[in-house]
Amino acid sequence: MLDANLFDEFYFNWYMVNFEKLYHKIALQIIGRCHGAIKITKHGKIIEVYDSKRHIWSKGLAGLIIKEECKNAHLRDWEFANVRSYIIKELLAKSDY
């Protein structure tokens, strides 16, 4: 019984690490799709985004772009917020340079 619990814990941790990598990869795809043209506040709120497919700047388009890319990656609706946090982390890290 003890070995089964250790296996379950190992499998759970391994599974979560892969999701973190997946969220990060999708976040980088979204930033690439927008050519990095995502305006955010210093606190991490997305203000405006440029969509190269539609060739427009929009204040409300960020959620739609994130949703489209997550659907293309076959993620569930509740996972979109995780991807958004990775986008914000990546952009804040780039703004420090």
Image: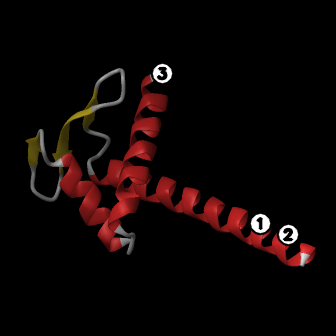
Q: Is residue 3 above or below residue 53?
A: below
Q: Residue furthest right?
A: 2
Which element type, helix, strand or loop, lies under badge 3?
loop
- Where the N terminus falls, by quadrant? bottom right
| Residue, disc 1 | 9
Q: Position of residue 31 (x, y in %)?
A: 35, 48
Which element type, helix, strand or loop, lies under badge 2?
helix
Q: Residue at x 9, y 51 (%)?
A: 55
Direction from residue 94 to residue 72 in the image, left or right = left
Direction from residue 93 to residue 31 in the image, left or right = left
Q: Does the CB distance between marks 1 and 2 fall below 8 Å?
A: yes
Is 57 in front, or is 7? 7
Structural crowding at the residue carrying mark 2, measured as other residues with C-alpha within 10 Å and reported as few (<14), some (14–19) or many (≥20): few
Direction from residue 84 to residue 19 in the image, left or right = right
Q: Residue at x 49, y 30 (%)?
A: 93
Q: Position of residue 62 (x, y in %)?
A: 21, 47
Amino acid type, callout 3: Asp
| Residue, disc 3 | 96
Going from the N terminus, do you reach mark 1 or mark 3 first? Answer: 1
Report, in whole angstroms, how far the alpha carbon at label 1 lies from the one at label 3.
36 Å
Report, in whole angstroms, how far the alpha carbon at label 2 lies from the one at label 3.
40 Å
Checking the image for residue 58, the label placed there is none
Amino acid type, callout 2: Leu
Structural crowding at the residue carrying mark 3, measured as other residues with C-alpha within 10 Å and reported as few (<14), some (14–19) or many (≥20): few
Which is closer to the viewer, label 2 or label 3? 2
Amino acid type, callout 1: Glu
